[in-house]
Image: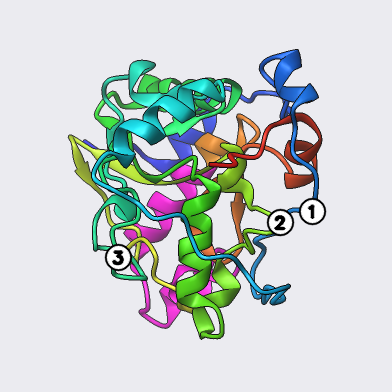
Amino acid sequence: MRLNLTAAAIVLAASALVGCAGSTNTQQAEQQQGGVASEQVGQTEQVGQTEPEATATTSDDGGVFDAKMREYGLVDVSTLDKSIKVDLKYATTDNFVGKDMYNGLRKAYLTKETAERLVAALHDLQKVDPKYSFIIYDAARPKSVQQTMWNLVKGTPQQQYVANPSKGGAHNYGIAVDMSLTYGGEPVDMGTKFDNFTTDAHTTNELDLVKKGRISAEALKNRLLLRQALERHGFKVLDNEWWHFNSCPIEEARKNLRLLDF
């Protein structure tokens, strides 16, 4: 039987909030300069100088990206917990731009600290009900892919959801994860699909969404359960995307981590 939300609140152990730290001194020494987009609700990114064309991708990019992720010290999340499913939506055409931008990349990479905290949150949740796990839709994202996304949405209503690559976003530092819950191996009802850029995906008006029949009470319970598990390990959800969690403020990432500049 699926767990009761009140029971989960009692059983899940609280953890102190922690920030982002570079995994090595080399990462700190080699951190990239420049600002970072906030990726907060309703904020429209400002169009900067003329953007360069995105680097061309080939069928070999999955292997190239894998190697680069490891070179930057990132961790393949599935190596820490095999129950976590990975379905990178930007490696398919099932995403808001309708384009495969990862061309072969199938693994979800995060900074070591972010990955370890994610798995710790999962293990706390599984103490209540072992049938729960996570599914990851996106994680660390190369700057070149960010550029491709920006070029596609620039000047459209979707522009507000994509960080300007000249600054970089949380995904470009390996501290952001787009994800959901699974139960018995299947994704649960969260009210909307991933990359649903309507107010139905917002996290600031969910009781009203239930009252209006926009999402179900079950979906709200599942959203709260996911947030509760992650927030106890220092993650913060975006106001306009129930699926997007940052492991620390972007300002800390900029100071301590390397921009995924490839």
Q: Is residue 239 above or below residue 188?
A: below
Number of disc labels: 3
79 or 226, which lies in front? Answer: 79
Q: Which residue is mark 1?
A: 35
User: Residue at 33% across / 67% down in the picture?
Assistant: 216
121 or 29, which lies in front? Answer: 29
Q: Disc 2 on helix, strand or loop?
A: loop
The amino acid on which the numbered mark 1 sits, given as a three-letter code, is Gly
Q: Which residue is mark 3?
A: 99
Point out residue 146 in the picture as x, y percentages from the top left corner: 52, 57
Q: Is residue 23 above or below residue 206?
A: above
Compared across the picture, whether 256 is left or right of 13 comes to right
Point out residue 205 in the picture as x, y percentages from the top left corner: 57, 72
Q: Which residue is mark 2?
A: 167
Write down the region rendered in magenta. 199-227
User: For the residues marked 1 and 3, what is the alpha-carbon distance in whole angstroms?
Assistant: 27 Å
Q: Are marks 2 and 1 in contact (CB under 8 Å)?
A: yes
Q: Is residue 54 above or below residue 152?
A: above
